[in-house]
Image (tube, helix red, strand yellow):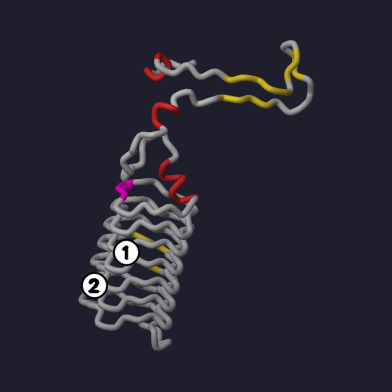
Amino acid sequence: FGSGGRMKIERDHARITSGVLGGQTTGGPIALVLQNLDHEKWRERQIEPMTIPRPGHADLTGALLFEADASGANFSGARLVKAHGGGLRMVNGNLSGADLSFADLQDIRLNDADLRGAKMENAHLERGRLNRANLNGVKGYEVYLEHAELRGATLVGATLKSSSLQHADFADTDLTDADLSFSNLLSANLGNSRQAGIVLSGARMPDNSMRP
């Protein structure tokens, strides 16, 4: 059934094995068997790893759900609103321009990843590893980065207003022109970070002081 080109080459048919008798349902569970006849052609082939999620497929959803290793993958502009995928590994991946709003991605590994211009409103990235990641121009409000590692990351012009940044490691990061106003930086490590033009009004600082 259908109108796609694959309909001409595939001859798969469903076989009813229970729940139907004489064309009538019996009230019991209906079971169908659908064998993948095309599987034999691919079983011995070496398939190149996919680095770009295919439109209309569950590549990205599966990677998040099963905490896959998507290192080097290109998810540029992906919509990950309310996504759940703790433990996903995407070292050196591309998430530039992605929408991570309200996503629950605790423990995610994004070392050396490209997140330029990503949206992170109310995103949960607790304990995430974003060392050396490019977060320039990121837009976020109430972002959760408690105990996250961002050593050597760049956050030039990033906005993380009213965010929870307690115990986060910002050592050696570039926070030039970043807006961290009203954020909680209690016990955060800002050692050797570049802070020219940074906005910290109303923020709670690592020494428990409050910026005016």
Amino acid at circle 1: Asn
**Residue toward you, 69 or 140:** 69
Residue at image position (70%, 25%) is 30
Question: Which residue is at the front of the view, 66 or 148?
Answer: 66
- 96 lies left or right of 83: left
Q: Residue at x 31, y 41 (%)?
A: 48
**Badge 1 density bin: few <14, some 14–19, many ≥20, Cα 10 Å:** many
Magenta residues, start to end: 73-77
Q: Residue under label 1, please give it.
A: 111
Left or right placement of residue 73 versus residue 165 in this view: left
Mark yes or no: residue 122 visible. Answer: no
Tell me where residue 184 sits by quadrant: bottom left
Q: Which mark is residue 174?
A: 2
Asked where in the image residue 130 lies, by quadrant, the reply is bottom left
Label 1 and label 2: CA atoms lie apart by: 15 Å
Q: Is residue 101 visible?
A: yes
> Which x, y percent locates residue 156?
23, 67
Front label number (1 vs 2): 1
Q: Nearer the viewer, residue 96 or 161?
A: 96
Instruction: Work out which residue is located at the far left of the displayed protein and give it.
Output: 196
